[in-house]
Amino acid sequence: MDNILSVLVFFPAIAGMLGFVVNKDSARVYGITVAAIEFFLSLWLWFAFDGHNPGMQFVEMIPMIPDFGVSYYLGVDGISLFIILMTTLMTLIGIMSMSVTENVKNMVITLLFLEMTMVGVFVSLDAIIFYLFWELSLVPMLYIIGAWGGTLRVYAAIKFFLYTFMGSLIMLVGMLFVAYIYHDLTGVWSFALTDWYALVLPVNYQLWLFAAFFIGFAIKVPMFPFHTWLPYAHGQAPTIGSVILAAVLLKMGTYGFVRFSLPMFPDASVIAITPIAMISIIMIIYTAMVAYAQKDMKQVVAYSSVSHMGIIMLGIFAMNAEGIGGSVFQMLSHGIVSGALFMLVGVIYDRRHTKMMDEFGGLASIMPKYAVIFGIMLMASVGLPLTIGFVGEFLVLIGFYQVSPIMTILAGSSIILGAVYMLSVYKKSFFGPVTKDENKTLKDLDIKETVSLVPLVLIVIWLGVYPKPILEPIDNSVKAMLSFMDEKAITQEAKDMIQVAKSTKEMK
Amino acid sequence: MESLVYIALFAPFVSSLFAALFGMSPRKTFVGAIASLLLFVSLSASMMLAYHVYQTGESVHITMMDWIHMGDLYIPFGFNVDQVSVTMMNVVTLVSTVVHIYSIGYMDHDKSFNRFFSYLSAFVFSMMVLVMSDNFAGLFIGWEGVGVCSWLLIGFWYHKPDLTREENPSISPSWAANEAFIMNRIADLGMLIGLFIIYWNVGSLQYDAVFAAIPHLTDVILSTAAIALFIGAMGKSAQFPLHTWLTDAMEGPTPVSALIHAATMVTAGVFLVIRVHPLFSVTPEVSYFIAALGTFVAFFAASMALVNRDLKRIIAFSTLSQLGYMFAAAGLGAYWIALFHLAAHAFFKALLFLGAGNVMHAMHDELDIFKMGGLKKSMKATYIYMGLASLALAGIPPLAGFFSKDAIIETAFNEGTLILWVMLVVTAGMTAFYSFRQVFLTFEGDERYKEFGIHPHEMYKFVLVAMSPLAILAVIAGFFRESFNAFVTHLLPGYEMSEHTHHLALILGAIVFAFAVGGILLAYKKYAKGLKRSEKVENSFIYRLLANQYYIPNLYEEFISKPYAMISEMMWKGVDLKIVDTTVDGIAKFLYRSGDGTRKMQTGNLSNYLNWMAIGGVLLLVVAMISAMIG
Amino acid sequence: MIGLSHYLIVSALIFSIGLVGVLRRRNLLMLFFATEVMLNAVNIAFAAISHYYNDLTGQMFAFFVIAIAASEVAVGLGILIVLYKKQGSLDLDELTTMKG
């Protein structure tokens, strides 16, 4: 299968089109089947992937607008491979656990289209195609929030759309400018990332372009102070929307930094280390505090997402393999853990139709299975060793320690503050006596919920104990990227800052 | 040998999983029995390993698999069984086996019986990982693992509601559990930083690589690494100022207190200092700080124990105090003595706690020793056990505590740190006093419990039998001091008293003994005949200060928890909603309003439009003219 | 001697008259006339400049403008008649259904 990537991208979309003729009652089963096939296809991709090859694999290239160098150009490397796997997995689990009852068919079709755009973003190697999928992903999410959301859904949906859209427009300007410079220097038009990588830009150009891309990605991440769309979007979105939003859509931003900003603008990235690290630390500490103040369980998880994304951002700008690799791993880990946490919040919301923690209390004795799974995910979220959350967080912090010990200590406070808000959620909701009568008759997890949550629990533990199969390809690609950045950097400061792994040096 | 290592390590894990299978089903005695059996298997394997290490003098090292490999960082799951870790393994598995068997009896009426065993075995597994790991990251896994198990077990009776601090100083089990976890996390951050320092200066987290690189590192790096690691140790071993969680942790079931909060987990900090002794022995300032802090905590905790009325809290304070002794020894360079005291303390303190558990079981969970008294009639065996343990704790020869504690006090003298010596001696007297105050108030004197209509009864026979190994060890462990010394100093640096101290050894021992006996006699005089309360004393400033733990928990609440909650609230409502979000909405609103404002232009009247068009045309002309003139 | 500038001044004057008519008149029919006046002002300018440069393109353009103006009037008057039949008035102040 040479064009496995095209299949991965378009299979869900085509299946989604066919979904229109599917009977209403079987829409869910249809969705699960399609998502499962897609997931197995992505597993096959992993199986066929050569972990020792740090470059792009399964490359497909078809010129689309040759005059302007726009081509249909796809490929995966160790960095994007697992994000794709996580995307297909979370879509599958999301559809499996879906508790939407109205317009199920529309929801399934929307999700399948969304899956196409998400996979598309992570496999695109052409800036225009990337941008296309990037923007397209907004539409299904807009629809999901706007159509199935809570009372403020229209406000939240529009805020989400306009905010992220504005950011990506600025990014588009940056992309066009890069292409223009490329044309200026070489005489040909190209939007292919691999061509752009070869472009050595003067530092002032790099800074401006970095800023343009930064705004697009930072709003998506979302970085402080561009994060306020997120609590609204999560607060109003249905469970499935939150799961996908937290698990995958946010990762597009951080992925963009790794894919575009670092290799294209190494000098600007090095200059940006301190400001970005400062923003990240504000994100980590500030949103952890805000999360602690929340009364709504879902908002806690939403703000905790921002806090964890801060860790990921910090790692990306550590400029060493430990930090960047840790960040990529943390993207997967956060995707799975926060997705699961949103699903868990959804479970109780379906039963009680409220997310306010003071309505709960003592759930551990009424819903023991639920409490166990919530507890495991909570521990993964606070980064307990031997769960998936620790590996990424540890690598990021150890990576960034080389850049700045003081900032690492500040960022490391996330392991304390994370425990503070997460444990307080757990205490308020699950511990203590059962005070409310409505809670006394709650049912524990049903089969549907168990089947969707247990695989995530298994993955959380498996990747916490044995992350090697995932870390190895990431490691290879990240090391290759770093040594490439080091060669490309023009200022001495950047060369000093970018840490090529010792093992890479030895190979040379 | 390798399979023995795996058996010792994974038997508790299997036990935990097995018990977890029945976690949600009603009480099944066989779960407890099988868990205990598996723990016994682990104990046997640990003993065989100890014998092997003793015989050959070599350590057993295995690497199970890779864990994390990224960039230049390489962390395997490696386990090392050497003299130090095998000692810890035996202490841990021995006490755990006893505690498991004990729990079958103690928890027999609890509906979450199976779940309890699952947690307890998981704790033992984490602890084994902690002590057996051959690298810092593995240590950290165990370190956090025991933290979580401790969280689960302190909060075991999670359904209890929050009370005010006056009604229950620990508020509620779940509150105490969270407090313990969060405080430990604060210290864990310090420890993580220590790991980072080591990694970036050595390039590895394996103990042997790190120890080999120590001579090449500068003093600053070594000292900061030592401080950072010690901060980690302070949290786990509840040293001041991170000590408040330990007494609150008494909310957990008593076997948990015996195993985790007396014998094993809290000694992990001491173990860390011993394990990383090559680092601490080259950083004398840090080590001296450790010794000084240890001595301070020994005294400080003992002072709070003097007036406390809660059976378990008194023992918890004494644990804190004894941990202080261990740190004093480790800080002064007498690592093997610290390890010896750690082991001896594990035996008698676990015994003491289990005895307290018996009392609680008899008294229907009443913990106030002022409401007990005269229990010796109905609980003879428990009285003997607790009496023995208290004697050992007080350091009366020939019990275990005498040999280990006396050595520590002697070390303080030998190092010439007289202030520490004096404090440790005084603390020894206080220890004897509060231990026997507790014993006498519980078992001797008038039977105050009768007022409350309680009919105490002795614990099950098998439980009492199960406790006997601890009792025996509490008595005889001291006699193995020299052979223990010879065994562990294969790995740890030896510590010999100077000639001078050697000559004075008898006198020094006599002083300590005098203090200990003095303490016991004082306690006997005051409490053996019954409780005589004095309003004047109880209302005195010092009494209230001590009874309220120097108001430190209140202080933390007023100056840390409450302000944190307040600032968080402010950050959310004040900053996030009012400033950040309002700015964003403001931009959107500006655009919206400007559109809304200019909408009025669109009157629908063609004539107006034409006017606007003309104005626009004129404006464009003007712009064109100006730009032509400038350009 | 009457030079180019005279023609252009006349053209500008007529254009201004047309413009004022467009801006001030309220009757749609009058508005139409005013635009025709403006178009013719431009035509004068075209013809004059064409003559000045000896280039016939300008005059050709003027013819085009006349032709287009004629067809525009045809269509426009048609619309006006329909509008008048529908509304009973051609006063712009009363035709504000397109209000935003």
Image: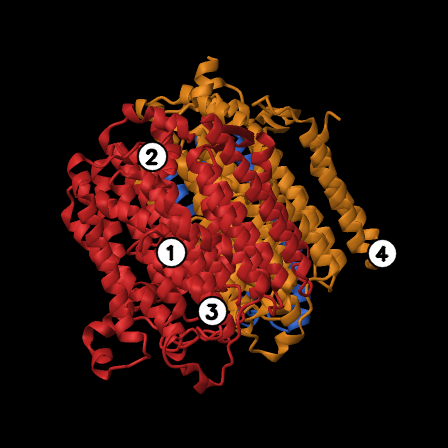
Chain colours: A orange, B red, C blue
Read off the chain for label 4. A
Please tell me which of labels 3 and 2 falls first in the chain.
2
Can see residue A412?
no
Is the same chain shared between marks 4 and 3? Answer: no
Please determine whether, in this image, residue A378 is positioned above or below residue B216.
below
Which of pointers 1 and 4 indicates the residue nearer the eye?
1
Crowding at label 1, few (<14), some or many (≥20) Cα neighbours within 10 Å? many
Crowding at label 3, few (<14), some or many (≥20) Cα neighbours within 10 Å? few
| Residue A457 percent coordinates (x, y) | 63, 49
Q: CA distance from mark 4 to mark 3?
A: 77 Å
Secondary element under disc 2, as helix, strand or loop, is helix
Which residue position holds label 3? Answer: B380
Secondary element under disc 1, as helix, strand or loop, is helix
Q: Is B300 in front, or is A172? A: B300
- The N terminus of chain B appears in which quarter of the rendering? top right
Q: Are marks 4 and 3 in contact (CB under 8 Å)?
A: no
- Label annotation for residue B183: 1
Which of pointers 4 and 2 indicates the residue nearer the eye?
2
Q: Is residue B163 left or right of residue B540?
A: right
Please tell me which of labels 2 and 1 falls first in the chain.
1
Q: CA distance from mark 2 to mark 1?
A: 22 Å
Amino acid on which the number 3 mark rests in the picture: Lys
Q: Is residue A144 left or right of residue B212?
A: right
Is the same chain shared between marks 3 and 2? Answer: yes
Amino acid on which the number 2 mark rests in the picture: Ile
| Residue A356 percent coordinates (x, y) | 53, 70
Read off the chain for label 1. B
- Label annotation for residue B197: 2
Q: CA distance from mark 1 to mark 4?
A: 56 Å
- Label annotation for residue A23: 4
